[in-house]
Image (cartoon, rainbow, N blue to C red):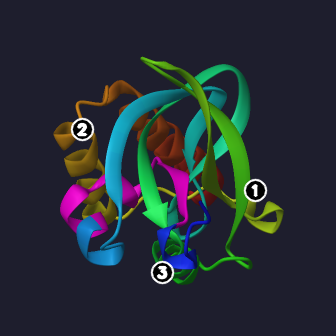
Amino acid sequence: MKLKKSEIRKLYGAYGSNLHLEQMAVRCPDSERITTGLLYDYRLVFRRSGYADITPCKGGRVPVLLWNISLSDERYLDIYEGFPKFYIKRELPVATGNGTVTAMFYVMADMYSHEICPPSPSYLATLQHGYSENGLPEIYLDTAVKSAYSFYEKHHNH
C-alpha cells in the first residue's frame, strides 16, 4: 500500500521549545506525542540569541521528546527553526524505554557553534514548562543554563 504524501510521517526529536505541548499543538497540528528518550553523548547548550542547541559531548545526555510529525508539520518546523540557515537537520539515535530509534533533530548551523548566550526568561520558562509536563529531569536544563551564564559573564564583563 502506497501512502499519500499527506500520510507520510517522520519521527522528530525535540529538546527545546518544542517540548511545550500546547505550543507544539498550535505549531504542528498533525503532530503526535510519542515518548520521551535520551540522546547519549550530547549535551544541551544555549547559543545565538539564547536558543537551545545540542552538541556532541562524550558521556553527555540530553532528555528529548519524540513526536510523530507529518510533512506539513515538518514544513512549519523548517520555517520556525530557520532551516537551513539557522538550524540544520541531523538524524540521531535516541534511547527510549522500548529500544533505540532514529529521529530527526534540528541542530544549530556550524557558523553559530562558537556562540554561547543565556536564554531569555520567557524562553527559559517555555523550556521549564516543557520539561515539567513531560516528566524530564530538569538537572540537564539547569546545568545548561548555569553553563551559559557562567560563560557569558566570563567573556562579557570587562
Marks 3 and 1, how far apart in space?
Answer: 24 Å
Residue type for callout 2: Asn
* Residue 34 horizontal/vertical position (percent): 35, 42
Residue at image coords 45%, 62%? 69
Above or below residue 66? Residue 20 is below
**Dot 3: element:** helix
Residue 1 is left or right of residue 140, and the answer is right
Start-end of magenta stretch:
8-24
Q: Which image quadrant for residue 37?
A: top left
Marks 1 and 2, how far apart in space?
Answer: 28 Å
Residue at image coords 34%, 69%? 30
- Dot label at residue 76: 3
- Outermost residue to the front: 1
In the rendered image, which quarter contains the N terminus? bottom right
Residue 85 is left or right of residue 49, and the answer is right
Residue type for callout 1: Ser
**Dot 1: element:** loop
Q: Point out the frontmost of discs 3 and 1.
A: 3
